[in-house]
Image (tube, grey):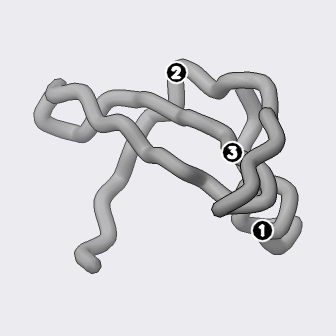
């Protein structure tokens, strides 16, 4: 998986899931201005320096 710089603009409230434990849908802009959707995101289980603000 390639790394990209993304400006996070939207993050949903976490919802429970049987398959993924918890889901957070996130969206933002790439450097070229195109949208990207990051789903599902294991937000609660990310390390402190990997978490991002709304």
* Residue in view at x 68 percent, y 61 percent: 20
* Residue in view at x 16 percent, y 28 percent: 34
Residue 51: x %, y % from top left? 76, 55
Q: Identify the mark nearer the N-term, 3 or 1.
A: 3
* Image quadrant in which the C terminus is located: top right
Outermost residue to the front: 18
* Residue in view at x 85 percent, y 57 percent: 44
As drawn, the label of residue 35 is none
As drawn, the label of residue 9 is 2
Q: Identify the mark nearer the N-term, 3 or 2.
A: 2
As helix, strand or loop, the secondary structure at mark 1 comes to: loop
As helix, strand or loop, the secondary structure at mark 3 comes to: strand
Classify 10 Å Cα crowding around label 1: few (below 14), some (14-19), many (20 and above): few
Left or right position of 22 against 39: right
Residue 12: x %, y % from top left? 68, 24
Q: Which residue is mark 1?
A: 46
Residue 33: x %, y % from top left? 17, 25
Check whether the beta carbons of the residues at disc 3 and disc 1 lie within 8 A of each other.
no
Classify 10 Å Cα crowding around label 3: few (below 14), some (14-19), many (20 and above): many
Comparing marks 3 and 2, which lies closer to the viewer? 3
As helix, strand or loop, the secondary structure at mark 2 comes to: strand
Q: Nearer the viewer, residue 34 or 44?
A: 44
Left or right position of 7 against 30: right
Comparing marks 1 and 2, which lies closer to the viewer? 1
Residue 3: x %, y % from top left? 32, 70
Q: Nearer the viewer, residue 38 or 52?
A: 38
Instruction: Give how far apart the Cα atoms at labels 3 and 1 are.
Output: 13 Å
As drawn, the label of residue 23 is 3
Examine the image and state in which quarter residue 53 appears: top right
């Amino acid at each position: 998986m390639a790394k990209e710089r993304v400006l996070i603009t939207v993050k949903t409230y976490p919802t429970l899931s049987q398959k993924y434990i918890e889901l957070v849908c996130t969206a933002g802009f790439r450097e070229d201005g195109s949208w990207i959707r990051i789903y599902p995101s294991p937000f609660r289980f990310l390390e402190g320096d990997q978490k991002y603000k709304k």
